[in-house]
Image (cartoon, rainbow, N blue to C red):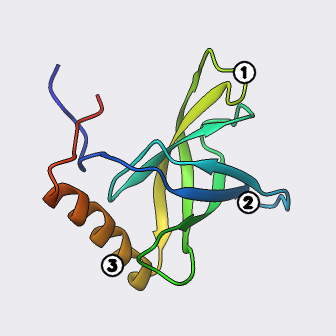
Amino acid sequence: MKETRRHIRINADLEVTYRIVKDYARKWARSIDISKGGIRLPSTQKLQVGANLQLEIHTALSIRPLAISGCVVWVNELNDEKFPFEMGIKFVKILPSDLRTLYRICGEQEAKNSIRWIG
């Protein structure tokens, strides 16, 4: 199968808080992987494809979390009691300073050769 992703996915264990736009309840997760264009997160609830999210990604490279708007592009059911779902989130809107930090995260991991393609 030919790889169609635009960005390489990096294994990354980052703390992420998120909320559905127009909802005040925040959820917490640890990322599975990340790229320059999106992130994969486990979830306790099944979100709808197309749901708009506000994400805060915590990283050692920044004093404050990266503030990113995203959109759920896929959801899978898992056989996991704690997190029965996982979702792919495409980054939609990100501040230039946060984008630079995201590129540093991905670039540093690429330089360490700890990359893998997720199909």
Above or below 2: residue 111: below
Kindly identify the amino acid type of the residue bearing the numbered disc 2: Val
What x and y, as percent, mark residue 99? Answer: 38, 74
Q: Are marks 1 and 2 in contact (CB under 8 Å)?
A: no
What x and y, as percent, mark residue 14? Answer: 50, 56
Which type of secondary structure does the marked residue at label 1 adopt? loop
Residue occupied by mark 2: 21
Q: CA distance from mark 3 to mark 1?
A: 36 Å
Which type of secondary structure does the marked residue at label 3 adopt? helix
Q: Earlier in the sequence, mark 3 or mark 1?
A: 1
Using the image as rendered, state which of residue 74 and residue 87 is in the foreground: 87
Residue occupied by mark 1: 81
Q: Residue at x 71, y 31 (%)?
A: 46
- Residue 86 sits in which quadrant? top right
Which type of secondary structure does the marked residue at label 2 adopt? loop
Kindly identify the amino acid type of the residue bearing the numbered disc 1: Glu
What x and y, as percent, mark residue 22? Answer: 81, 61
